[in-house]
Image (tube, rainbow, N blue to C red):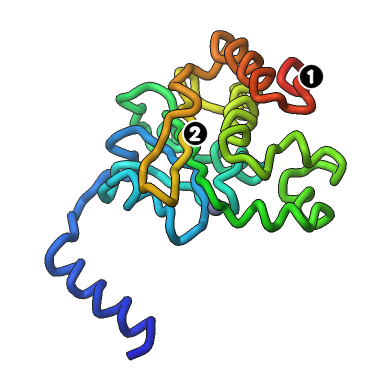
Amino acid sequence: MSAIDTLLQRNAVFAEQRFTPNLPLATTLGITVIGCVDPRVDPAHVLGLELGEAAMLRNIGGRVTPATLQMLTLLGMLPRLLGTPRPTGGMHLVVLQHTDCGITRLAREPDRLAPYFGVAPDELDAKAVLNPYAAVQVDVAALKQAVSALPEGSTVTGLVYDVATGRVEIVAPTTPLGDAGRSAGETMVLRAGADTPSRATE
Ligand SMILES: [Zn+2]
């Protein structure tokens, strides 16, 4: 049996036994997860998310890249276009990165990895690619810098998932995006030892 046959067989069981019709387009938990494509860290499994509960943006590393921000901007517009305001206020963003991430290997190819972040190769160090705990702080700060593109009342939480234990750890407690959150973000970047704290204070 091919892998596709396996998937179709599993889908038949899903449609029969677990499918929930008429789910709303808006997430029922108001959560948007930014996570990695690594097959071991699917947020639905790791965080026990059910259908309809959260939107998930997955890319290499679970990083806040220019493409991530573009997607978040478009997603942030949806409730207004649908005429259904978020019951939970703004977007509740969860940055979920993990140990033993493949992006640490890609760091050996800085000329190819830098454009992913929209930076020059010599600026890649500031992205903390080798350390997920620091990288979450960098990305939380990047989201705080992008607050004007996100719905009012949005928040961000930073998590690191340990592939050796199955547990997530809060490395950036939930903070509001916006003016209050922006000052907290500056502090976190400085504590994380990022090479370019000036980016957080632009
Ligand atoms: Zn990864």
User: Label for residue 198?
Assistant: 1
Of labels 1 and 2, earlier in sequence is 2
For label 1, the crowd category at 10 Å Cα-Cα, with few meaning under 14, some 14 to 19 and many 20 or more, is few
Image point (29%, 78%), residue name? 8
Mark 1 vs mark 2, CA separation in Å: 27 Å
Question: Local crowd at mark 2 within 10 Å, few (<14), some, or many (≥20)?
Answer: some
Q: Nearer the viewer, residue 176 or 85?
A: 176
Q: Does the beta carbon at disc 1 come under 8 Å from ligand 1?
A: no
Quadrant containing the N terminus is bottom left
Quarter occupied by residue 190: top right
Disc 1 vs disc 2: which is toward the camera? 1
Instruction: Residue at 18% x, 55% y: name it.
Output: 20
Q: What element carries label 2?
A: helix
Residue at horizontal 28 percent and vertical 46 percent from the top: 48
Which element carries disc 1, helix, strand or loop? helix
In this rendered view, identify the residue nearer to me: 11 or 86.
11
Q: Residue 11 or 140: which is nearer the viewer?
A: 140
68 in relation to 189, above or below: below
Question: In the image, what residue type sits under mark 1?
Answer: Ser
Position of residue 84 measured from the top left corner of the image (x, y, whole percent): 34, 31
Residue 37 % position (x, y): 51, 56
In the image, is 171 to the left or to the right of 3? right
Reading the image, the residue beneath label 2 is 76
The quarter holding residue 124 reads top right
Left or right relative to 200: residue 47: left
